[in-house]
Amino acid sequence: MPPKARPTRTVFDRSTIERLAPDVERDADRLLDELAEKLRWGEADFVSTISEQLPVSTVGSWLGIPPEDYPHILEITHNQVFAQELLPTKSQLTVSAEATLALRAYFTELVARRRAEPRHDVLTGWIHTWDAMEPDREKADEILYRLTMFVTIASLETTATLLTSMTHLLTEPARWAWLREHPEHIDAAVDEVLRYDPPIHINTRIAAEDTVLAGVPIKKDSMIHVLYGAANHDPRRNPDPAGFDILRGGSHLTFGGGVHYCLGAALAKLEARTLLARMLDRFPTLRTVAPPEYAARMVFRRITSLGVAL
Ligand code: HEM
């Protein structure tokens, strides 16, 4: 049997990100209009108004998910990610399994609808790509459902947490004022937020062979938990790690590393950078009025609320 063709480009290459930029800018402006309206009357919750909405609007317009479905997608994604926890309870696994079925039903239907009515969009492109590589239509649909579902799960909780942490950490008044004067450091500010408080705290690997890692012998098939937060705060890589320093020029493992390095890192940064630049411009006195509230999770962290005011 001839070998199956392999995709030659990643799905998130530079041109994909460039094409998404105007959508992200438009959605950020629309959501910030809503925030401005709420702030006219006092305090607002940043998470429900902005952090959860920008990522779902971005991935939604990219994959062609109808906006009226966003609340459903958000709800089932929140429930699905329990399965990635280190020690999920039985009831969390049940909730997650139900959410996985709901996501499967949703994305199978989305792929079927796009097959019936192709568009000039990314999902139609993926359908063409996989049909060319996988002659068995059922198998191709299975791959497409998994791809769309995985991209959605991977991009929502993570980016939402980044946008909230960013707002919490950077609206400290002196920092906010400094960044307004130094917008050339917006990218560095986003990177320092990613280092200081990563949205994913733990990733897991299985050793493919006996090895030694940083002087520690590791047996083949051992399970290794990588603690990204701890790695980012290792003083050997980032001196004075507990200090928040936009100009540190440090490094972090927040998007992982190696062949599985996050495919959406550039998109997450695009959303953060776009939102931050606009907030600095529109809300010179934006401040946090209540500390962030966290869901009881370790792997995919989730911030459920952040009170802000002007
Ligand atoms: C701040 C936001 C994000 C964070 C912190 C994050 C973090 C991560 C991490 C830690 C990994 C695992 C890397 C590894 O195993 O070495 C990963 C993989 C991945 N991420 Fe992200 N991610 C973010 C946003 C996104 C977005 C927006 C998308 C999609 C649009 C995305 C798509 C993916 C995909 C497809 C993978 C799997 C790559 C592979 O296994 O080859 N991520 N991400």
Image: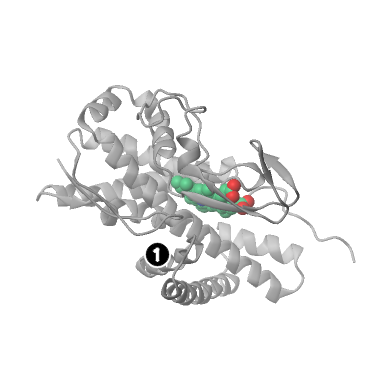
* Quadrant of image for the N terminus: bottom right
* Residue at x 50%, y 56% (from the top left corner): 154
- Counting labels gives 1
**Which quadrant: the C terminus?**
top left
Q: Which image quadrant for residue 270?
A: top left
Where residue 206 appears, as percent x and y from the top left, is 66, 54
| Mark 1 secondary-structure assignment | helix
- Which residue is rendered at x = 19% and y = 38% of the image? 286
Residue 139 drawn at (x, y percent): 70, 72
Say how the picture is coloured. Answer: one colour
Note whether 108 is above or below 183 in the view shown: below
Q: Residue furthest left?
A: 41
State the residue in front, 108 or 86: 86
Height in image: 214 above or below 298? above
The extreme right residue here reads 1
Residue depicted at 57% across the width and 57% down the height:
122
The percent coordinates of residue 57 (x first, y second) are: 39, 56
48 with respect to 233 (left or right):
left
Does residue 125 appear left or right of residue 43 in this picture? right
| Residue annotated with mark 1 | 78
Q: Residue 280 or 229: which is nearer the viewer?
A: 229
Crowd rating for badge 1 (residues with CA inside 10 Å; few <14, some 14–19, many 20+): some
Assess mark 1: CB under 8 A from ligand 1?
A: no
Where residue 186 appears, x then y in whole percent? 38, 30
Please give the name of the residue rendered at 47% of the width and 72% of the height, measured from the top-left corner: 93
Q: Is residue 100 visible?
A: yes
Type of amino acid at the residue the image marks with label 1: His
> Does any portion of residue 65 appear in the rendered image?
no
Q: Left or right: where does residue 268 sit relative to residue 11?
A: left
- Decide: is 232 above or below 59: above
* Residue sitting nearer the eye, 285 or 307: 307
